[in-house]
Amino acid sequence: MTANAPFDLLLAGAGHAHLGVLRLWRAGQRPAGRIALVSEGPYAWYSGMLPGLLAGRYRPQQCRIALAPLCAAAGVEFLQGRLLGLDAASNSVSLENAQRYAARWLSLNLGSQPQAPATTDISLALLPVKPFAAFLQGWSEWQQAPQALAILGGGAAGVELALALGRQVPQLTLLSNSPLLNGHPPALRRRALRHLAAAGVQVMEGVAVDAIQGDSLLADGHSVWRGGRVILATGASALPWLRESGLDTDARGFVRIGPTLQSLSHPHVFAVGDCASLPATPRSGVYAVRQGPLLAANLAAALASQPLQKYQPQRQALALLADGQGGALLSWAGLTAEGKWLGRWKDRLDRRFMALHGAES
Ligand SMILES: Cc1cc2nc3c(=O)[nH]c(=O)nc-3n(C[C@H](O)[C@H](O)[C@H](O)COP(=O)(O)OP(=O)(O)OC[C@H]3O[C@@H](n4cnc5c(N)ncnc54)[C@H](O)[C@@H]3O)c2cc1C
């Protein structure tokens, strides 16, 4: 393990909020001090455009942000490597490549990973939707010889993936442990079911897959699907090593933070987006993006020993789900709608977001 000279601030993970921070610093708001970003890959992939990429509507270059140029423009050192651990007592992180970095302040925007059911002697191939780079690589290999597959997870991600992929494989089954799109208005579920039927997707709702054995998905000990390929788009689970970091985590392993976005146990650590646990703050890109400007302000204040601001989560968030055919389904404040015009609107919003960070248009 190699220890390096400490940083003033280390940004861990190129999540949505850190991208916003880098963008503000690029525009001239960078605080003084030695600052670095650690990311496992050279790009930050944008989940909002992933279904469109899979449906063949975008090129990869339009859906990812190159981190080295963004960091250079923001005056931040870019360190590429996968984090394997964090030691809250010494405010340091360790990487897969055996490097170790300590910092006066840490900021975590590491996202989450899909929850995997228990597996025994599995003979089917499992492909988690995150990390995106590995998912895209795995998917392109699968598509050399398309086969029937199942998607586990009936939330927005699972539905968007099924709509994007349904027409590209001989048979696609979408399994959800609750009604589809639980938490959204029932009308959104009905709209989604119609689009899924048109794409030839078989939907199984209220089926809680809790184990995978051989080539079978099991719910309560019974086989509910058999086959060779399964995509995991289940709800967010925490990166396992966060629980061992010494940081206060909730029962599911997410870092508990307060309104200033600081760890409840270690105020020198900030955490935002999916990896953090804060009441009334759902895990979605929309919330992580909104945390960016406040995080930037609070990191600058922390470095200058100034008072910090409090984050107030928005009450409503707009959801726009790609329908796989260039349109979109909308859910906002109990209302739903669908149409090609919503697809064009989503496309404009997504491209604008990416252009702000220097992605190809
Ligand atoms: C198919 C799909 C579609 C979605 N569509 C939407 C949508 O339209 N709108 C929406 O609001 N939400 C959407 N989501 C949810 C959204 O992706 C997440 O809630 C959001 O990405 C969380 O953002 P974040 O900033 O916390 O982290 P992320 O954007 O996930 O970023 C985390 C970063 O940390 C890096 N990282 C992770 N682990 C390590 C490690 N060990 N070492 C180094 N780096 C690491 C990752 O590479 C990544 O760059 C979608 C999800 C999926 C799967």
Image (tube, rainbow, N blue to C red):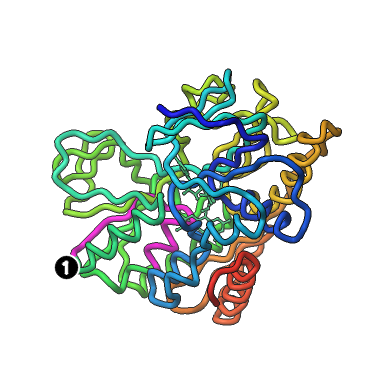
Direction from residue 230 to residue 309 in the image, left or right: right
Direction from residue 237 to residue 289 in the image, left or right: right
Picture layout, residue 20 above or below residue 164: above
What is the three-letter code of the residue carrying label 1?
Ala
Q: Which is nearer the eye, 268 or 4?
A: 4
Picture layout, residue 287 above or below residue 330: above
Direction from residue 1 to residue 283 in the image, left or right: right
- Res. 333 image quadrant: bottom right
**Dot 1: what SS?**
loop
Residue 347, x across and y down, in percent = 57, 75
Q: Residue furthest right?
A: 307
Residue located 60% across and 81% down the image: 341
Residue located 86% across and 33% down the image: 307
Residue 61, x across and y down, in percent = 46, 71
The quadrant the C terminus occupies is bottom right
Q: Which is nearer the eye, 4 or 26?
A: 4
Q: Which is nearer the eye, 176 or 283?
A: 283
The quadrant the N terminus occupies is top left
User: Is residue 155 on the magenta stretch?
Assistant: yes
Residue corresponding to mark 1:
145
- Res. 168 image quadrant: bottom left
How many numbered dots are placed on residues in this image?
Answer: 1
Residue located 66% across and 29% down the image: 104
Which segment is the magenta one? 147-163
